[in-house]
Image: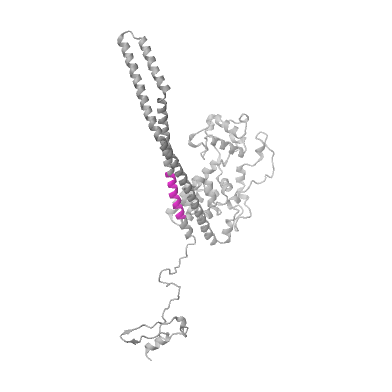
Amino acid sequence: MGLTDHIATLFGGRRRVPAGPATAELPIPPVAAVPNAGAAPAPGIPSPAIPSPGIPSPSGPGAATGEPADPCGESRVAVDETCSLADRMNALALASAERLREARLAYDQHADRRGRAAAEADPRVVRGAKDEAQAAFRTARLGAREQGALETAAREWLREVDRVNARTREAVRLLALANAAEAGLLQAVDRLGLQADGARITAESAGEACRNARIALATCEETERLGRGGPAARELLAPASVVARATPAPMPDPAPRGPDPERGPDSSTPGIAGIAASAGVAASAGIAAGASADAEPAVLPLLAGDRDVLRRIAATLAEGDAEAEGRWQGRLAALVDAVRARAIDGAALTFPGDGFWAQYTQVQGREIAAALAALGYRYDGRDGFADGRVPGQRELSLAIGYVGQDPGRIRIWPSEAELLHLYAGVEVDAGRFVAEAAGELTLGDMIDLLGRRAEELSDLWNAWGRVRPLLLSPA
């Protein structure tokens, strides 16, 4: 038997045999049908590479690589798709609202022109104008000393009557046109109003889908990162959030004092400044293993304006990219500004213990500040009033009266010059505001907290799964 026959017999195949003018390739049975499939090949003869069914070739499409698949890839794609759709729907809603505003403005202008035309075409107005012209002619006739003056007065009277008649005819013509066009304008306003409502509802639904997709992405990223961080990192973000633990309820006063008769029955309640002062020493035992009891999350000094914490978080998010670090610093600064603005809107302020505010408790001070804001005199976050609107003593007295206090019993009344610096020494308690409104810093809570201000922080929300653990990590 030749070498060719030996190889064919070894691998269970059949050699090519002549069959007349043409040659046929006899099929090779499957490997499973070969009795000696597991036998070692003869020395010096290489084994053929027979691919297993269903397993792709390492060099072909779908070959396995050393890079792990992104577990949050689907969530990331969903965020891109839903949020881009939400942006388009929001743009359409804004365009629809603008068209509706223009249609309403056109109708208002039309109604104004129609009203003026109806007034000029009113028979009583026309009769009054003619009577005034006739009265002027009679006065001129009685004072005329010669025939020429009398004729001049008569000509002026007739010209005035002609002007009144011309105005009346033009007013009647405009009124007819306005009446004919009014139905069409009203229909346009109604139609555009329905379109604007539909676009707004669609934009709100798309925005909600974008928000849910972002929440899912943040949860996925956070779970993935904390899954590699060990049990201590997972416990750090337990439902009893770090922010809430670092800003606890007021500590009991070891020496309770009674209410101050000058300041009212609420004066014994510790102010928010005292609460914040005890925050560092009252962290509960729920803090992650290895963290000290007085540790506070990084979000608190960040909201207090600590630039070092801001730069550290931005550097961690940038992962060594200097240009990206600058962008992250801007995003975090925008987040701080938005939270502080919402805290000011909610009158989350800490008042000094001297001057005008010493007469009131912290709660009463916040109520007075909220009443001033309702009157249009809003705290600017520094030591003055927003937009330069400074209240007078009358407005301050109204705000005090709105919160149930008697302005007549004020012992320290600021002068007009002192009102300009009424908020001197007042601080924004943004940390406690966030702890009470969104203590776990979940994406949904933060978006609800910031409201319309959250729309400018899309890049931050898309990476919230990376940002939130850093904000809740010990400072």
**Which picture quadrant has residue 366?**
top right
Q: Going 43% across and 76% down the picture, which residue do you hit?
A: 51
User: Along the line of sight, which residue is nearer the eye, 188 or 363?
Assistant: 188
- Residue 333 visible in image: no
Quadrant where the N terminus lies?
Answer: bottom left
In this rendering, the answer to whether 106 lies above or below 25 is above
- Residue 182 visible in image: yes
Q: Going 65% across and 38% down the picture, which residue do you hit?
A: 267
Q: Going 43% across and 34% down the picture, which residue do you hit?
A: 108
Residue 18: x and y in percent read: 33, 87
Q: How many labels does the image show?
A: 0
Q: What stretch is highlighted in magenta?
A: 79-95
In this rendering, the answer to whether 310 lies above or below 59 is above
In this rendering, the answer to whether 19 lies above or below 188 is below
**Which picture quadrant has residue 412?**
top right
Residue 163: x and y in percent read: 34, 22
Q: Going 68% across and 34% down the picture, which residue do you hit?
A: 261
Residue 182: x and y in percent read: 41, 35
User: Along the line of sight, which residue is nearer the eye, 74 or 198?
Assistant: 198
Residue 222: x and y in percent read: 53, 57
In this rendering, the answer to whether 93 lies above or below 291 is above
Residue most toward the bottom?
1
User: Along the line of sight, which residue is nearer the eye, 222 or 195?
Assistant: 195
Asked whether 89 falls inside the magenta stretch, the response is yes
Asked whether 86 falls inside the magenta stretch, the response is yes
Q: Which colour scheme is used?
A: one colour
**Is the stretch drawn in magenta largely helix, strand or loop?**
helix
